[in-house]
Image (tube, grey):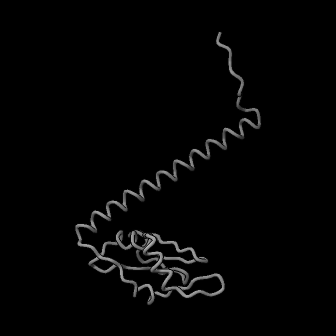
């Protein structure tokens, strides 16, 4: 999926669970052909080279970019041999899993910090050292 807002392009890989889903007018769904793995296409369009290719095909009007499916379909994507694509796909899968885990861990750290902060503010958490005895 590719979405545009201002000069920011967002690319997301959608799994089989979205099969048959309706894509709104501000999204473009891209289905790779049989010679390209979806993760390879995803990695390309997330890269600076892929982003530049997308931006180069867009039309600009009043702070919004417009991409048409036809213009996206004309972008030449490098297609390595299938064995290389499989390695790229595994690398992308691992990177996305790692990213998701890091974001989840950061969200948990934030929640814990906010919980501790509220407990400190309301006196529910004692900050004075206790004497051993």
Q: Residue at x 54, y 84 (%)?
A: 25
| 14 or 86: nearer the viewer | 86
Residue 114 picture quarter: top right
Residue 50, percent from left and from top: 43, 75
Residue 117: percent from left, percent from top: 70, 40
Judged from this view, the residue extending furthest toward the top is 133
Q: Position of residue 97 (x, y in %)?
A: 41, 56
The residue closer to the viewer here, 68 or 122, is: 68
Residue 29, located in which quarter of the rendered image? bottom left
Q: Is residue 49 above or below residue 92?
A: below
Residue 70 falls left or right of residue 25: left
* Quarter of the figure with residue 49: bottom left
Task: Using residue 107 as the reference point, say whether residue 22 is left or right of it.
Answer: left
Residue visible at 37% across and 60% down in the picture: 93
- Quarter of the picture containing the C terminus is top right
Q: Is residue 8 left or right of residue 119?
A: left
Marker count (numbered): 0
Locate residue 2, reporting x and y percent.
Answer: 49, 76
In this rendering, the answer to whether 15 lies above or below 20 is: above
Residue shown at 39%/69% (left/top)?
A: 43
Residue at the farthest right position = 122
Quick one: 20 or 53, which is closer to the camera? 53
Figure check: 70 above or below 12 = below
């Amino acid at each position: 999926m590719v979405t545009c807002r201002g000069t920011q392009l967002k690319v997301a890989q959608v799994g089989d669970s979205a099969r048959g889903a309706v894509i709104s007018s501000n999204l473009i769904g891209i289905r790779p052909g049989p010679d390209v793995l979806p993760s390879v296409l995803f990695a390309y369009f997330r890269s600076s080279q892929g982003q530049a290719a997308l931006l180069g095909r867009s039309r600009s009007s009043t702070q919004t970019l417009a991409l048409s499916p036809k213009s996206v379909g004309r972008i030449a994507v490098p297609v390595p041999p299938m064995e290389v694509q499989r390695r790229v796909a595994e690398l992308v899968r691992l990177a996305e899993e790692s990213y998701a885990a890091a974001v989840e861990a950061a969200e948990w750290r934030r929640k814990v910090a906010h919980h501790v902060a509220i407990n400190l503010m309301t006196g529910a958490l004692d900050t004075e050292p206790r004497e051993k005895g």
